[in-house]
Image: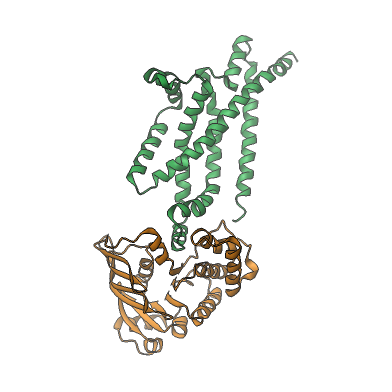
Amino acid sequence: MNAFQQIIDWMPTLINATGVTIALSVTSVITALILSVFLALGKISKFKALRYPSTVYVFFFRGTPLLMQLFFIYYTLPNLIPSLTITSRFLAAFIAFSLNVAAYLAEIIRAAIQSIDKGQMEAAKSLGLSYTQAMMLVIIPQAYRRMIPPVANEFIMVLKDTSLVSVIALTDLTFQTKIIASNRASSLVYIPAMIIYLCLTGIFTIVFNRLEKKLSIYE
Amino acid sequence: MSIIRTVDLSKKFGTLEVLKDVNLEVNSKEVIAIVGPSGAGKSTYLRSLNGLEHITNGEIYIDDELFDKRVHGIPQVKLDHAKKVEMLLRMGMVFQRFNLFPHKTVLENITLAPIKVKKVKLEVARKQGIELLDRVGLSDKVDAYPSKLSGGQQQRVAIARALAMEPEIMLFDEPTSALDPELVGEVLTVMSDLAKSGMTMLVVTHEMGFAKEVADKVVFMCDGQIAEIAKPNEFFSNPQHPRAKQFLGSIL
């Protein structure tokens, strides 16, 4: 009973920290999504000037550990270029996650776009639509639905990967849990923390499933 | 005046020569059926006309205006974008696999290009769209999604979609080849009506009945070349080219 009471007492602090976890995941995935559409279009572009930078970007951000990218932005960058010093831990984490996740989402979006039957582009062109119009009005809207399952997967990974921000002392759910665990010398706090993570991933799984159903009306 | 004319049009995929010096003229209100064995280059020819395939050599004229000319794959004419689109839109294209936009309703499929490309007002485009659907016998399917329609119905929508851009000529790329046999008739009926209304049509088809009854001319292609051009009754009763005789012998 004592243990149970302890957990109840920790809850407000944990839930506060959960806000940081959610805010970081949602904002960085949304930013990454916008960035990744451009990267994906760059990767399938016939112009080298667009294709090469996108390819190098994806290669770099998928090819190095997220943890190191986080360190790099928060610690290394200010040493190299003092004007790029980021004092806000949240902002540093947000930038690192957005840039990293964009690389993964770019590949998801590229695959979804390329999975659309090429007859769709041909029909659009034969009706006089420009490449941009065909992409925005015909191809990408169809690719949305195909992107949802892998994007949901990526989002859930990000939600959990945000626990890495404890290394720059940003008080997310994981960091807060560690603080409580060491201050109170009680490892019990990992139980409610894990349950909170499970609830979060559960809620977002439901949200994405609904979204997928909603976008499937025409099938 | 010819609507479409090609001069020594050729197309290579690598070293494979799919079209060899194809010369053809389609005059206003003419219905031409292109027939021939598979691999003859019929579809490639049709797709070359509106730029879905880039030709290797030759010239394409639309209304006697040069639309494309290439030598060894290198373009020799540079039209500005607006002019190119305007000329492209004189041709309407119907595909073997319909290629309707699955995320748009039947009416949206038809109105998309008029609104976005021709800047037609929404209400005007919708009104035209409904009229076109009525013309292909699908006025009850306005708000349906393509996946809810049969293949024959989808192809009729695709025809209406192409007509919405008010082309001078309609190109049909094996429009009934992907259909179940019982659905072929409804599409051919729409095409016959279109021919009767005076539309210029270039039709790649395996439907010999259609070629015989509706076409003004039959073009027989084999090995990337036009082997014979004749009136349908002459072509079907007395083909001249040995490959045409062989082809008709194998299908009839």
Front residue of A121/B239: it is: A121
Query: x, y percentage for residue A115?
Result: 46, 51
Q: Is residue B208 above or below residue A118?
A: below
Which quadrant holds the N terminus of chain A? Answer: top right
Instruction: Write down the quadrant of residue A149 in the picture.
Output: top right
Front residue of B16/B187: it is: B187
Q: Is residue B190 above or below residue A190?
A: below
Query: x, y percentage for residue B87?
Result: 40, 66
Q: Colour of chain A?
A: green
Q: Colour of chain B?
A: orange
Query: x, y percentage for residue B4?
Result: 36, 74
Q: Is residue A103 above or below residue B112?
A: above
Q: Is residue A219 above or below residue B160?
A: above
Residue for point 46% across, 78% down: B207
Residue for point 62% across, 25% down: A18
Front residue of A187/A159: it is: A159
Which quadrant holds the C terminus of chain A? Answer: bottom right
Total residue callouts: 0
Say how the picture is coloured: by chain
Residue for point 63% across, 66% down: B141
Q: B151 left or right of A82?
A: right
Query: x, y percentage for residue A74?
Result: 45, 20
Residue A159 visible? The answer is: no
Residue B242 visible? The answer is: yes
Name the residue at the right extreme: A1
Instruction: Write down the quadrant of residue A62 in the picture.
Output: top left
